[in-house]
Image (cartoon, rainbow, N blue to C red):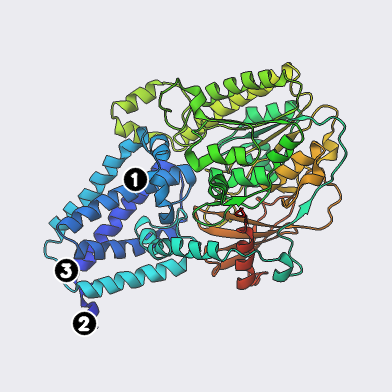
Amino acid sequence: MAFFSALTTRRFAQTVLLTLCWLLIVRASHILQSGIWPDPVGMIASDLAGALVLAVLLSVTAGAFRVLLVVLLGCAAFVAGMHLTVHGTLFQLSLIGKGVDPTFVTGSLLNRHSLLLPVYLVLAWLLHWLHRRLVAAPVTGGKGLGAFATLVIAVYAVSFQSLTTPTNNLVASFFSQIPSALAGPFTASLRRGDDREVSPQDIRDDTNFFHQQVAAPDVEHPPNVLLIMVEGLSAGYFPGVSDYHNLNPTVMLSSLEDNLSHHGFRIYRNALSMERQTDRGTFSILCGEYPDFHRQSRKMIDIAEDRARADCMPSRLLEKGYTTAYWQAAPLDYMQKGDFMPRVGFADVTGAEVFTSEGEEVDGWGPPDPTYFDNIGKRIRKLDASPAPWMVTLLNVGTHHPFNTGEETADDDDFGTGDLEKLAAAEPQQARRKAMKTMAESLNRLLDGLASEGILDDTLVIITSDESGGFIRQDPESLPLNSNVGVLAVRPPNGDSLARYAPKTQIVAQIDVPPTILDVTGLGRKTGDMIGRSLLVRQQNSERDLLLADTYTGLKYFLRESGQLLSCSELMTNCSTWTFDPERLFGTLQQTDGEPFLGFEERMALFNNAAHMKPIENP
């Protein structure tokens, strides 16, 4: 065992103790920054693995490599803290390319929270300095140490279903993700090259993951449609829903919930968000298909660049004579929405550019919610004056990190002067809370104004979200679907009755929005290849199954509405089974010892089928 003799030296033991203490300090700073307390047992085990890996790195690096290590440590700790605060997870290494997009950089990275970067860099340098002072002589046996670190990383990688939950250690998680991150583009290209659709019947007779059902009523006077996607909103933020499931949300939107009830909305208690990230949720909400469950989302981009096509809900309304409009607050070039939206049926498409003067650069992600929703109200009033029916889809940006409310406060000025201590002491999630409250006030004003002028009388209004990002619940480590607690609230036009719609305890999902809109507007027979179940369906022909995922944790889910859930790792190899009450999905999840109700090949085939898109045929 001479090969591993360096592991038994006193100097290496001192290095491990030093790195463990350092990682625990970083862990404490992340808890203060995000407000998320990980499972203590898993946390200590994870940090010990990270300490062993980091101790090896300190033992074998010097000169330029040591400088690189210090910089990477500081940057990783900074990004991990920000990602935990915003998304509730550590960062996915495979999504690092997103961080170089100019819109993302100016919108999410260049803000007052970036002042913490030098703090973490100094903390990383302090580790280097202490190691040089306390462990003066270098540890020999670099090959043995390298082999040991590789073994620790391999064991760590197979021990966790997800490598990015709050329990994970940022050092061990980073290195454990490297193999799959490097293989990701290669395997994705193989999947796209072998993009054959698999018939659900070929997978298993008792599965129903590609369910479509509509009521298809005849409609004499089709109503207008107002589809509001609120960035990052979760129904868990409504007190009535969180109390129903016994959740512990970071935000409470009592005023918005009360106002929606006042205006006749039905808020669904078991609403599912299909995935994380805006382009994935938007695709499902508009096109009635599963989002891209791959790490790198391609479905919206492939349509924008004419490589694939989708039969989407806005195009059906446009063909029917509707004026279709998509008005978002963020720049249209981000995620190529400026090209995607016209191709799926929107005649009027605008983004942050309309809120700036000609030639002026967009500030961050776009206008704050008070400015955005006030502008939207004026545009809807103008549009409603025309004789044609209209369908407008909205997406705000004020509830996206860094949560710009448009207000300059004394605190903001203080932070601008570099008061890092005050920034670090700020209450975790306070910025999100403030942004959500500002959004609620702005949305309430919009709905109140449209209702008072009678515009909502002949309008179907649906409030949903691109994703339920940032929802933090009690015991976030042990329960699945933490990031899939979606929102769906529906207000039928006057003359219609909520008695026709699905009960508020029914399990609903983002893919149910397109068939519902087409049903209410009399186009239920025009759903084509869309999947989803219209809310007007009262007699269900069968129970359905749903595919869901969380790209930030790498988890994939197979849900049966009868009360079963299969939670699997990204590679589908590590799965756990759960049961739940179908009327209280998020509040009754219980893990069982049962075998997975789908085999490995079936699991892979289902997600491959969900990835299928119709290619554009060359003329």
Disc 3 is placed on an element classified as loop
Q: Residues within 10 Å of mark 1 (few under 14, many from 20)?
A: many
The percent position of residue 238, horizontal first and vertical second, equals 64, 36
Q: With respect to residue 412, does 605 lie above or below?
A: below
Residue annotated with mark 3: 139
- Give me the C-alpha separation between circle 3 and circle 2: 14 Å
Q: Viewed as shown, does residue 127 lie left or right of 29?
A: left
Q: Nearer the viewer, residue 49 or 297?
A: 297
Residue annotated with mark 2: 2
The percent position of residue 608, horizontal first and vertical second, equals 60, 63
Residue found 44% across the figure and 43% down from its top: 85
Q: Tell me which amino acid carries mark 2.
A: Ala
Q: Residue furthest left?
A: 137
- Give me the C-alpha separation between circle 1 and circle 3: 29 Å
Residue annotated with mark 1: 78
Q: Earlier in the sequence, mark 1 or mark 3?
A: 1
Q: Viewed as shown, does residue 119 lie left or right of 568?
A: left
Q: Which numbered disc covers residue 588?
A: none
Q: Do labels 2 and 1 touch, CB within 8 Å?
A: no
Q: With respect to residue 207, does 337 lie above or below?
A: above
Whether residue 16 appears in this view of the structure is no
